[in-house]
Amino acid sequence: MSPSTAKRWLKEAGIEQRAEVKRGPEPMQCPISADELGRRYAATTVRELAESLGVSPSMAKRWLKEAGIDKRPGGGPGPRKSGGPRRRKQCPISAEELRRRYAVQSIKTLATSLGASRRKVREWLAEGAVVVAPRGRVGGKEGIDMASLIARYEGGEGLVSLSRAFGRDAGTLGRWLRDAGVKMRGRGRPKAAGRTGIRPGVME
């Protein structure tokens, strides 16, 4: 029997029909307990919580509301669990090793090798009583044998080679040499000792 026939018979019998109530699908229930939901939400965001439960963020929000869990402003992770103040990141190498590396490396290079920010590296240097060079320049003249530097440069060695040997950048070494009154060579390779400038095969 079809629904339309049943309705006709009810009408013929003078029975008033009730208004039909359309029932939607049953709302999806949270697969974890309210306590577990609150515990997870305390350590993550709504979006991450939703992804872990395989639902949309709006569904996760509804479950939080039904469980009586207040949504945090901004949706970020909740406050850290009690356990004392946040521990400061410690330098992974000794103060002496940090001082040694800083003598030949820049702040940026140190930060990259140590997996820290340049600000943090400066803090570690300050804690080790190391004076940071202005504008991140590597070290100073401490430990540099200027007499040897001058002799090697005047002997024909280039600034690039000297920067590797002395652990300072070429520009800094060039400035020190000029300050010391050394006559600087032009750019290019130095002439080899004893070179006459005569092309091979050309007779004098």
Image (tube, helix red, strand yellow):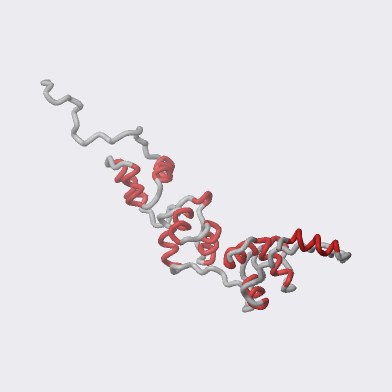
- Relative side of 36 to 124, left or right: right
Q: Nearer the viewer, residue 71 or 26?
A: 26
For image coordinates 45% across by 61% down, the residue present is 114
Visible residue check, residue 66 = yes
Q: In which quarter of the image is residue 202?
A: top left
Q: Is residue 129 above or below residue 189?
A: below
Q: Which of 96 and 85 is in front in this view?
A: 85
For image coordinates 50% across by 53% down, the residue present is 133
- Relative side of 143 to 12, left or right: left
Q: In which quarter of the image is residue 71?
A: bottom right
Visible residue check, residue 85 = no
The spot of residue 109 in percent (x, y) is 44, 54
Q: In this view, does 23 lie above or below 161?
A: below
Q: Nearer the viewer, residue 143 or 101?
A: 101
The spot of residue 16 in percent (x, y) is 87, 64
Q: In this view, does 138 lie above or below 9?
A: above
State which quarter of the image contains the N terminus. Answer: bottom right
State which quarter of the image contains the C terminus. Answer: top left
- Relative side of 179 to 123, left or right: left
Q: Is residue 113 above or below residue 78?
A: above
The spot of residue 87 in percent (x, y) is 57, 72
For image coordinates 67% across by 76% down, the residue present is 34
Q: Nearer the viewer, residue 204 or 103?
A: 103
The spot of residue 189 in percent (x, y) is 29, 35
- Count up the numbered dots: 0
